[in-house]
Amino acid sequence: AQSVTQPDIHITVSEGASLELRCNYSYGATPYLFWYVQSPGQGLQLLLKYFSGDTLVQGIKGFEAEFKRSQSSFNLRKPSVHWSDAAEYFCAVGSRGAGGTSYGKLTFGQGTILTVHP
Amino acid sequence: ETGVTQSPTHLIKTRGQQVTLRCSSQSGHNTVSWYQQALGQGPQFIFQYYREEENGRGNFPPRFSGLQFPNYSSELNVNALELDDSALYLCASSLDGGTYGYTFGSGTRLTVV
């Protein structure tokens, strides 16, 4: 069964500092990997996704993530955090179905709450 | 293009009642997935509909059921509500089963009292 672990429940950084949010997954084959962000009371916004190809993925809002198969990791990074980045971040793994398509089940981690100090 | 729209945004129901939540998928998307997000948790997959048929289901009892309509909008129905059903219910739409990613709506906050 697929699973996702986000080891850090809560991270606090200062504005302008760099950020790395950790994500480890368990999946039998090459996974689909996603990072989503959620503001309080809101739905999920996709930051970036990895399906195949280049293991360094660029996303919106200056975020990037690197897929490391040997470590089963897909960590999210940002070189300089802005106060508006404060939110909860979710890593998710998706299943690959027949023909390389996904049949839709995303398995999410518990989330990491990011607090940004001025 | 329009995004994913869910209604209602908030709902309060009594234990034992039934509830229907609605979702309009993003224009051009033929796949809808539903997720339950309890407070402080990550979303959990309930089921997915692709071209009006259920093609994947998570670990939820049969009292959670759904429909997808010809215009690809969707409903989530929950019968015999329990207190633990209180959660944010998220709908996500995608194209062709999710190959190109998923767009989430803002959710329906269901409170069961």
Image (cartoon, coloured by chain):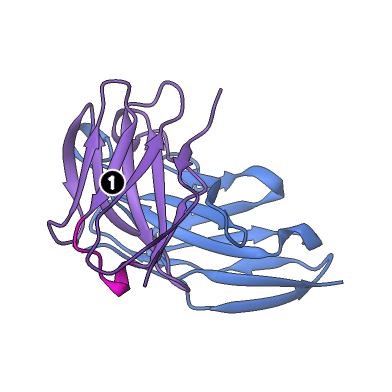
Chain colours: A blue, B purple
> Residue A71 or B48: which is nearer the viewer?
B48
| Quarter in which the C terminus of chain A is drawn | bottom right
Quadrant of residue B92 within the rendered picture: top left
Q: Amino acid at mark 1?
A: Leu
Viewer-proximal residue among B65 and B48: B65
Residue drawn at point x = 15 percent, y = 57 percent? B63
At a point 46% along the width and 29% down the height, the residue shown is B26
Q: Where residue A23 appears, x then y in whole percent?
A: 47, 67
Residue A29, given in percent of the width and then of the height, sits at: 25, 53
Q: Is residue A46 above or below residue B31?
A: below
Q: Nearer the viewer, residue B17 or A21?
A: B17
Q: Residue A81: percent from the left, percent from the top?
A: 77, 62
Is A72 on the left-hand or right-hand side of B55?
A: right
- Left/right placement of residue A14 relative to residue A89 reads right
Region of the chain picked out in magenta, as a range: B79-85
**Which picture quadrant has residue B52?**
top left
Closer to the camera in the image, B50 or A91 = B50
Specify the quadrant that holds the N terminus of chain A.
bottom left
Q: Which residue corresponds to mark 1?
A: B76
* Residue B69 is inside the magenta segment: no
The residue that appears at 18% across and 46% down in the rendered structure is B56
**Can the viewer see residue A80 in this picture?**
no
